[in-house]
Image (cartoon, rainbow, N blue to C red):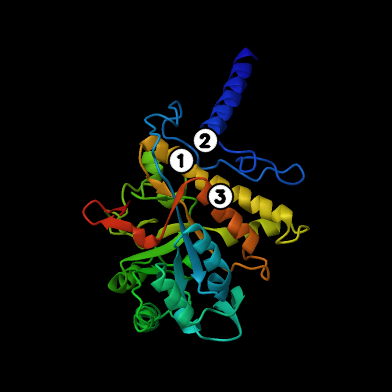
Amino acid sequence: MLKLALCLANLIISFTLFQSTYGMSSEYKVGQSVGASLNFVSFDNLNPVNQTASPYDNQTSNVQKAAIILFDRGDHTHFTNARPILDKYGFKASFFIICSFIDGNGYYKLLNGSEVLDEFDGPMNWDQIRTLYNEGHDIESHGMQHRYLRNLSSQDLEYEISESKACLENQGLNPTYFQIPSNRGADNATILKTISNYFDFGLSGHSKLMFLNCDGWINHGFKTRSYKHQKDCNPYSVEGLPTRTHKYAIREWSHDRYHSEVNNNFPYLQPHGKEISNMLFSEFVNLVETQKFYNERAGKIVAIPIVGYHGIDKYNTYDTSEELFEREMRYLYDNGYKVLRLTDLGYDQNENRFYIK
């Protein structure tokens, strides 16, 4: 019993030190309960390699905190609703465009066969996209028609990827990233080879953090399959098989995917009501603060959260409201985060790792 009591005391002291070290205000406190007897912030994946070592060993006081903001599919609300908020805080972001949807009208359905993956009401037009580009935002490719790459013939695969780049280049844009539709296909050698023929980098899959060396599991104890067995970002293992996380499978955290999970878990709450918004904000704070554990321990930035959004409005149960989006951007601004575009990352070909330019 004495040993158990001592263990519990140590846990309480450790958690208190964690909160005081990060200096969070009551408004943004990670782990706070929101709603009826619910705690929405978890510390899964916060598993150091050496469980006895302090997470603050070798920390430096001037380690920067960073986040990358990206937008998926080219929704018109990215320009009308998200852009003014980004401008307000001086942030630049990366926008992924489905080329054949631009300048279209009507209600779009993204399909996987007959399954409706997502729906949205109206994309941006080319003038809006060029305005974003001229203002310093990234404009990147999310495919020509957002087709499920694994189901395509070699000819259709080539078209979906190559024509999406040509389409953007014809508008005076310079895409270097390809986001794989539906996040499926980065483990396929043919798909990877086709992407690499036209783009320098790619996105696929989900993770709370993107480790610049893709070594989250081995060197940092970030226990997720996304980084298992990897020491660098080489797209292929020594056996010649695709790795899980690499330069064509950079991993994001989908704000709207988490929103969907919360909606499913709490169907009796209004999708954009105060309770849901507080849950989403709490998880957002947990996400961006999680990097400090690894960056301060390493004495430099080794991990960055990449936060992905779809629509910024109130009309779709999976989109993010303008109020919540501004609250999250203000949190980054007030707490000294450096907000990056994907093109602010460089890549060391010799060491197969990313770095901040």
* Residue in the picture at 33% in, 74% down: 174
- Res. 349 image quadrant: bottom left
Secondary structure beneath dot 2 equals helix
| Mark 2 to mark 1 CA distance (whole Å) | 8 Å
Provide residue 77's location: percent of width, then percent of height: 57, 72
* Residue in the picture at 66% in, 40% down: 32
For residue 257, above or below residue 34: below
Provide residue 84's location: percent of width, then percent of height: 54, 66
Check disc 1 and give the amino acid type: Lys
- Mark 3: few/some/many CA within 10 Å (<14, 14-19, 20+): some
| Mark 2 to mark 3 CA distance (whole Å) | 14 Å
- Res. 144 image quadrant: bottom left
Comparing marks 2 and 1, which lies closer to the viewer?
2
Mark closest to the chain's N terminus, 2 or 1? 2
Disc 2: which residue: 22
Provide residue 167's location: percent of width, then percent of height: 38, 83
Disc 1: which residue: 292
* Residue in the picture at 57% in, 38% down: 24
Check disc 2 and give the amino acid type: Tyr
Secondary structure beneath dot 3 equals helix
Disc 3: which residue: 331
Give the side of residue 181 with respect to residue 159, left or right.
Answer: right
Mark closest to the chain's N terminus, 2 or 3? 2
Q: Are marks 2 and 3 in contact (CB under 8 Å)?
A: no
Q: Is residue 141 visible?
A: no
